[in-house]
Amino acid sequence: MENTWWVGPDDLIPEQSDLIELPADKSFLIKGPPGSGKTNLLLLRANFLALGGHVNLRVVVFTRMLQSFLAAGAKQYDFKASRITTLTKWEQDLLFQYGVTIVDAPQDFEKRREYLIGKIEQLVETRKLEDLYDVTLLDEAQDYLPSEIRMFRRLSKTLFAVADSRQKIYEGEDCMEQLSEAVDTTRTLQFHHRCGIEICRLADALTKDRAAHTPMEETSNYDEDARPSQVKYTLHQSVEDEAGAIIGHLILQMKAYPGELLGVVCPKNEDLQIIWKVIQESEIAPHAVLRRSDDDAPFDPDAPIWLSTMHSFKGLEARALHIAGLAKLGRFPNQRNLIFTAITRAKTALRLYSSGDIPDFLAQALTIFEPQPAKPKIADAFGKKK
């Protein structure tokens, strides 16, 4: 995909380039808004350290989809993709390396991660393990458990983590305090480059619940004149109707944005499957791929349309993004963070779809794109006449 990875130092602004060559013997936490380049910087930092002789390192991510995406970037930077792993794979490999058998591990994601980190803690204490790696680099670090951060720190000479607390979407105790204590220095990226102004406006409307929020609109380096951004929300009769509307827009967007990734995401996999079935019966079927959380397929830069759940799409970006099935958003914990994370995957065009009620906080945020309603009359409060 075009414009996905930086190709040279001139692509970076000073606050980004300064992070790549930070001292190798120190641990760092890098905070920044969506689109500030955190994931790209993580990969460049990993390659910089590997070239400097720190070959025993690991880049740890949450999903296989993001691992596949980073592996595609690793090819460009001549970095060994085998050093990029998911959290679950890292835990399983470490346990296997020391002969620890995994028996009857829970299938539920949250219970399984607690089971695995418990096994790691037991192994570390029994064997008195420490400093197994030169450095561990953590993407989306806000989503790790405090116990996971403690193990990463103990087993690594240094840590390099990137995080944004507004994008914590998984259950479990918050780890930001643990992260701050695990590093020598915290640095903050100010500017971001991905999201158009209209997308920033929606993101800012969603995060007004936080007193310390820095508005994305004020720190955007997006070129709005070159590609004006847009946000649209539409209500439909069914998820199938949502799919039909999405297909119509995708047909136009493949022509408007050649060589760019277009995304379709849903909160629930059941709605994603419905949309995938409708797309498979349409003219855009040859251009679309469905990516599941357990999918080992490599990142395909030639497939212009990617479908996945909102959780699996985390860490990626799309020139145009369609978020469907929003009537199910209210079923998730951290739902405000989940939709914030999803909308900030979009660069230029963002469309949201629902065939039912959406959470009030999202409905309120979307009113920024609507004209102010006229002041109601007292009689209006009584509803329709019988």
Image (cartoon, rainbow, N blue to C red):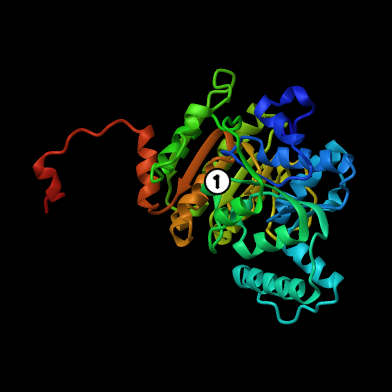
Query: Of 52 and 310, which appears nearest the observer?
Result: 52
Left/right placement of residue 137 relative to residue 377 reads right
Left/right placement of residue 258 relative to residue 173 reads right
Query: Of 159 and 115, which appears nearest the observer?
Result: 159
Q: Position of residue 331 (x, y in %)?
A: 46, 62
Bin the neighbour count of mark 1 within 10 Å (Cα to Cα): few under 14, some 14-19, many 20 and up: many
Left/right placement of residue 117 relative to residue 198 reads right
Left/right placement of residue 30 relative to residue 76 reads left
- Give above or below for 240 relative to 367: below
Q: From where the camera sits, is residue 66 visible?
A: yes
- Residue type, label 1: Ala
Query: Of 160 and 227, which appears nearest the observer?
Result: 160
In the picture, the quarter occupied by the N terminus is: top right
Please report the residue visible at 54 percent of the width from the left and 29 percent of the height from the top: 196
Please report the residue visible at 62 percent of the width from the left and 49 percent of the height from the top: 314
Query: Of 158 and 145, which appears nearest the observer?
Result: 158
- Give above or below for 186 relative to 230: below
Number of marks drawn: 1
Q: Quadrant of residue 204?
A: top left
Element class at badge 1: helix
Residue farthest toward the left in the current orientation of the protein: 379
Disc 1 target residue: 342
Please report the residue visible at 52 percent of the width from the left and 51 percent of the height from the top: 338
Q: Position of residue 121 (x, y in %)?
A: 70, 72
Residue farthest toward the top in the current orientation of the protein: 225
Q: Position of residue 310 (x, y in %)?
A: 58, 52
Q: Position of residue 129 (x, y in %)?
A: 80, 68
Please report the residue visible at 54 percent of the width from the left and 46 percent of the height from the top: 341
